Image (cartoon, rainbow, N blue to C red):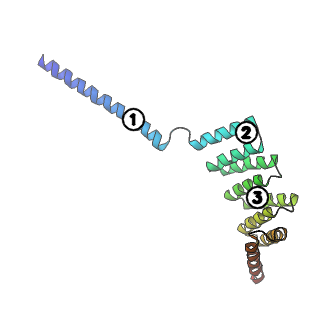
């Protein structure tokens, strides 16, 4: 009888230990999912929400929100596509152009950013800020000639702008560099 009680007690202890280990394992799995992820990320949820808004109301604003959500998740090709749709819906909006050019630049598409800005400045030849941005993007792309022309147009359109003196100085540097090149 005493032997049976000891065996029962030992069996209960073993079951209790095994149950504790199983429970601890579940806790570690849950903690691992919390710490290392395991469901949808917050950014993925933002993308889903933005896509739902685009399906409900495919406006320029909705597409720009989708572009922002994609960019936040470092999905630059998708972000550029969404920003292009926003520009198609509101081609005269410089805010939309800025978003698209910024995303194209981040994606390493400086040539596409230049084309976007050239199309906008062709349609809006008095938009000084667009010429300034075109000059900056062209300069980053190694197109000093185009940068110089864009900076000249900016200074013509906004000679008293707070950045005009800086742009004039940069223009002189570009002209000096091109005149000393072979």
Quadrant of residue 105 within the rendered picture: bottom right
Which of these two is toward me, 124 or 122? 124
Quadrant of residue 161 within the rendered picture: bottom right
Which is more foreground, mark 3 or mark 1? 1
**Which residue is pictured at 79% across the width and 72% down the height?**
148
**Which residue is pictured at 72% across the width and 58% down the height?**
109
Element type at marker 2?
A: helix
Element type at marker 3?
A: helix
Q: In the figure, 121 relative to 4: above or below?
A: below
Q: Residues within 10 Å of mark 1 (few under 14, many from 20)?
A: few
Q: Residue 108 carries which label?
A: none
**Which residue is pictured at 69% across the width and 50% down the height?**
77
Q: Is residue 92 left or right of residue 104?
A: right
Where's residue 141, x and y in %?
72, 66
Where's residue 120, x and y in %?
83, 58
Q: Quick one: label 1 or label 2, which is nearer the N terminus? A: 1
Element type at marker 1?
A: helix
Q: In the figure, 102 relative to 153: above or below?
A: above
Provide the residue designation for mark 1.
27
Q: Quick one: label 3 or label 1, which is nearer the N terminus? A: 1
Q: Quick one: label 2 or label 3, which is nearer the N terminus? A: 2
Where's residue 103, x and y in %?
70, 55
Q: In the figure, 74 relative to 154: above or below?
A: above
Q: Residue 112 carries which label?
A: 3
Q: Are marks 2 and 3 in contact (CB under 8 Å)?
A: no
Q: Do the residues labelled 1 and 2 touch (CB within 8 Å)?
A: no
Q: Are marks 3 and 1 in contact (CB under 8 Å)?
A: no
């Amino acid at each position: 009888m005493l032997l049976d009680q000891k065996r029962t007690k030992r069996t209960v202890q073993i079951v209790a230990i095994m149950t504790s280990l199983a429970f601890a394992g579940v806790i570690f799995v849950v903690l691992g999912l919390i710490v290392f992820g395991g469901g949808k990320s917050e950014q993925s949820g933002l993308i889903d929400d933005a896509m739902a808004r685009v399906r409900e109301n495919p406006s320029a604003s909705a597409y720009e929100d989708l572009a922002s959500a994609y960019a936040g998740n470092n999905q630059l090709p998708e972000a550029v596509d969404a920003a292009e749709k926003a520009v198609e819906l509101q081609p005269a909006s410089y805010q939309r152009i800025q978003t698209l050019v910024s995303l194209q630049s981040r994606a390493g598409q400086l040539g596409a950013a230049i084309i976007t800005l050239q199309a906008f400045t062709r349609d809006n030849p008095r938009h000084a800020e667009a010429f300034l941005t075109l000059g900056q993007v062209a300069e980053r792309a190694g197109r000093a000639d185009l940068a110089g022309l864009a900076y000249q147009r900016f200074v013509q359109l906004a000679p008293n702008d707070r950045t005009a003196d800086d742009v004039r100085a940069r223009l002189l540097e570009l002209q000096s560099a091109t005149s000393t090149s072979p």
